[in-house]
Image: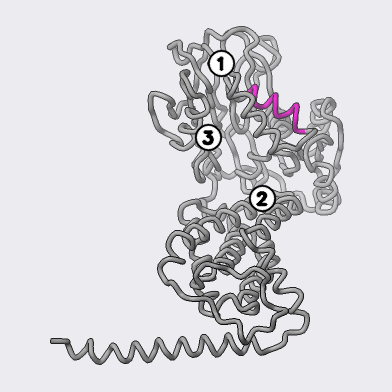
Amino acid sequence: MSSPNRSSASPAVGRMRNWLQGRDLAVFQSVAGRHWPGADPLLPQLSRSANHGLLWAGTAVGIAALGSSARSRRAALRGIASLAVASAAINTVGKGAVRRQRPILDHVPVMRQLKRQPVTTSFPSGHAASAAAFATGVALESKGWGAVVAPVAVAVAASRVYTGVHYPSDVLAGAALGVGAAFALRGVVPTRGQLPAPGRPPGEAPALPGGKGLVVVVNQASGTATATASMVREALPQAEVVECAPGDLSTAMEKAAGRGEALGVCGGDGTVNLAASVAATHGMPLAVFPGGTLNHFAYDLGIETVQEAAAALTAGDAIKVDLGRFRPGPKGPEGADGYFLNAFSLGAYPELVRTREHWSPRIGGWPAGVLAALHVLRGQRPLEAELQGRRRPLWLLFVGNGLFQRVGPAPGRRHNLADGLLDVRVVHGGRGPALRMLAAAVAGPLTRSPAHAAVRRRRVRIAGLAPGTPYAYDGEVAHSGTELLIDKLPEALTVYCPMPV
């Protein structure tokens, strides 16, 4: 015997479903019967361009190229990743769950109809899901680019009703699924804004409104440094900006340290490394303006734009950070110690850096990095070394200045740049270096296995090296003697840095 509640509820549910379907059809017919000025040639073409995600792939490339910043690249990558998640959900679950037929095209003018009609079921709209996922993913990393992409995403979603291939409810459901996919991805791979602020022991530095008392040394050969230098002059009109070739950087920085209250640097990580050693030696604060191919140190501080660095200078906001050290330095036992802000490495990575630097002027930094990785991992042999008193073959020894947290499958941002510890990661010798390194990256910090290990140490001693063994520090390559000692100088460097709101 049926319960009274069930029997009374079923007709109500049926009436609600019929009412929604009626409204859905009424809106569809209203759109089909209405002429939108300029839409007839535009929306069908826009709808076709979004097939297989081609429109969004092109948009992502444009964002990464035109934005020329880490935030833009992250926005483009997150948009594509969100789209991939939404597409997978649509194709594996969505289309099969509700097998709704496509609308009948009797009410849709022929000139609006697509030349090739979709053959899949109607609910939900894959185009709307992809558009919403891409736009939401981009906006989660960059509100500015999100505002640019959003109108295009709305137009693509609307075009699916306008061309007669979807009911309005198909589009709304697809858009909701796309937004949900972007937020689901954010739950697994956090955006930069979700990550906790880096460790920030306060440092003392003079406030320099307008850049008065600041001397900025610019590496003319670093990435976008020349364009960034123009932005520095505009943001800090009273700063002295010195542009020079790579070979003149050391001399220029020593001179700048003698005549300014603070030393500024514009370039990649290798240039910033040199400036940091000069600033620490002279006991003066450092201002970092990201303008190179790689700017890991600046980004880990939360500095992504000239305006952020200028605001910290104007307010006198600064923090202390640790400085990694290795002995003997690049000039050998008789020279000064070597320093690193990001990482020191032995094994496959130095050769990867050298190969990347050879190809990057011709094909660009990221393609050169991929080519270098393929080349090195195919032909490299394990390094023989004595690590902490035990001799072993190594594919890679990575020593990070502070613990590198995972953001996705690989080491990412450091949350604390003054923790006093080294992030030591070893990929042991054996077959399959590429698989071993991938496993080490996926496992992340503080793990151990037969193929790799990750621990934290205050110092690392390496002996038994073949003289002339290459090593890399902050993207620069040098050659060792038979021994190396790696440790840290806690809170040895003061850096201008915007304070969290």
* Residue 76 seen in the current view: yes
Is 447 placed above or below 395 here?
below
Query: Would you say the residues marked 1 and 2 are in contact, meaning their CB atoms lie under 8 Å apart?
Result: no
Tag 1's secondary structure? loop
* Residue 186 seen in the current view: no
How many marks on residues?
3
Q: Residues within 10 Å of mark 3 (few under 14, many from 20)?
A: many
Amino acid type at circle 3 is Gly
Q: Is residue 357 magenta?
A: yes
Position of residue 482 measured from the top left corner of the image (x, y, whole percent): 58, 8
Q: Which badge, 1 or 3, comes first in the chain's sequence?
A: 1
Instruction: Compute the Cα span from label 1 to label 2.
Output: 34 Å
Amino acid type at circle 2 is Arg
**Magenta stretch?**
350-360
Q: Nearer the viewer, mark 1 or mark 3?
A: 1
**How would you classify the magenta stretch by its main secondary structure?**
helix
Left or right: where 224 falls relative to 137:
right
* Residue pointed to by mark 3: 402
Q: Residue at x 62, y 29 (%)?
A: 373
Left or right: where 212 falls relative to 340:
right
Q: How is the image coloured?
A: one colour
Q: Which mark is residue 73?
A: 2
Position of residue 180 measured from the top left corner of the image (x, y, whole percent): 49, 65
The furthest residue to the left: 1
Amino acid type at circle 1 is Arg
Q: Nearer the viewer, residue 75 or 171?
A: 171
* Residue pointed to by mark 1: 381
